[in-house]
Image (cartoon, rainbow, N blue to C red):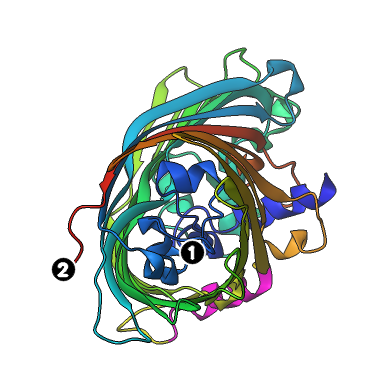
Amino acid sequence: MNLRLVLAAILLAGTLSGQTFDDALRFSFVTPQGSARFAGTGGSLTPLGVDATTLHTNPAGIGWNRYNMAQVTPGFTFTGVKSDLAPDAASGPLNESVANFNLPSVGLLFAGTTRSVNWSTLNFGVSVTRLADYNRQTRFSGRSQGSIIDGYAADLNDGFNDSYGSDLALQTGALFQDDQGYFSDFDLAENDGGRVRRDGLFDRRGSMSEVAIGFGGNYREKLLWGISFGIPFFTYDDVYSYEEVDDQGEISGFDNSSFDRSLVNSGTGFNLKFGLTYLPTEQLRLSGAIHSPTAWTIDEQFSTGFTYNYTDSNGAALGGTALSDLSTITYNLRTPWRFMLGAGYLIGNRGFLSLDADYADYRGNSISFDDFATAAEETNRSIDDNLSNSIGLRLGGELNLKPIQLRAGVGYRQVPYALFLNDEDEAYLTYSAGAGYSIGKFFIDLAAQYSGASGFETAYNAPANLEQPLITTDRTQVSVLLTVGFRGWNAGF
């Protein structure tokens, strides 16, 4: 547990404004959701192909297609978060949930032939698939010592003025100054040990998807090849609302305070993917792929507001609200290279088993600004210090009971924080199951995915000598996907 508390403290340092290593990870840590068949096998279809989603993993997967195919996949995702505010264990956990309908995948494959004896196919594909889901809410509540104002006083006493935090507290009269420095009502002797009620909500919305356009083919029915051009795009809104109330009159002078933060991001990027699949036998497939870094251009808007209300010695109600300026910036993010390997085995015409792995070193993330070459040096040092490499594994299979197909899969991915590098327990697990029905040119697939993860939030940045108000979270996510498709009409494009 101590390791996790240290991580939470590090994450806290960059949550108020500016670009952080956490932002870099958020926009580079992606997993294609894809079609229901792809999802039902745990995302392990990379070596087998014949699915438009492989344009986002190993584009050689479309090189085997002998028929045109069109498929669309609507979906439903339910995300639940259980949270506990420390150190107030008496308040008990709170549960919050978000449900949304989405479109995880749309794909078109066009099968073409050539006049070459050795290079018999030249196929073209277009796919749009979801890479990340940011929709979740975390609500917390409890009573404990300390205040968000403690952190503002510590910043000013350390000579750090923050126009999105401590400067707002000064404007509302939340802080006082004497020969010893800045202090607040919470530092007064008569208020020592006093507790306040605190309530908050992290409301995050958005998603990342990618358009992939690619070509693929095969050489002598032994070597499949493919290349795709990816255009990812995302929106991400992070709204945080926090309030402290002296609900039991334990802090003389203080009535209540609140803090609001709004972060709005959107971005567009591009990348290239190249892959090969080798068929040493009719049953065995061995695959490999390389993904270039994604070059992102990201627009960001950021603002905060702070309210402080108190009663002076004469019984007068004072205080007010201060709002920051709206910060609008554009920055660039370069994500790391990604490498993939896979192996698949066909069990006659009864189904298949498939294993897929990927590797990325998230220290390869780099943030930059067009007009200020050195502005992001500190953030990039933080990326190198706090992020690490990550291995992802996916195992899945399909049992063909014509015209019904049954599928299952499991996924494993390491948490790419440096503190967790040697902690095998810190990983994300995903479980998948699905079924399909195929008759003639028509097919329909259904899949369900379940994943769970533990994490941390922090209510505010407390001084090092005080206990951090940490919110421990347990997140579960269930996704249901339905793919409807047609295949086999006249080949060619």
Residue at x-position 83% and y-position 48%: 2
Give the answer, above or below, for where 335 lies relative to 140: below
Choose top left, top right, bottom left or bottom right for residue 298. bottom left
Residue type at mark 2?
Phe
Q: Secondary structure at mark 2?
A: loop
Check the image and name the residue furthest to the top: 248
The residue under label 1 is 28
Q: Does residue 379 show up magenta in the picture?
A: yes
Q: Are marks 1 and 2 in contact (CB under 8 Å)?
A: no
Please tell me which residue lies in front, 71 or 295: 71
Residue type at mark 1?
Ser
Q: Which mark is residue 321?
A: none
**Image mark count:** 2
Residue at x-position 49% and y-position 58%: 30
Query: Residue 99: x, y in percent?
Result: 40, 27
Q: Does residue 184 show up magenta in the picture?
A: no
Q: Secondary structure at mark 1?
A: loop
Please tell me which residue lies in front, 147 or 209: 209
Magenta segment, prevailing SS (helix, strand or loop)? helix
Asked if residue 146 can be seen in this view, the reply is yes
| Label whose residue precedes the other's in the sequence (1 or 2) | 1
The residue under label 2 is 493
Give the answer, above or below, for where 168 lies relative to 374: above
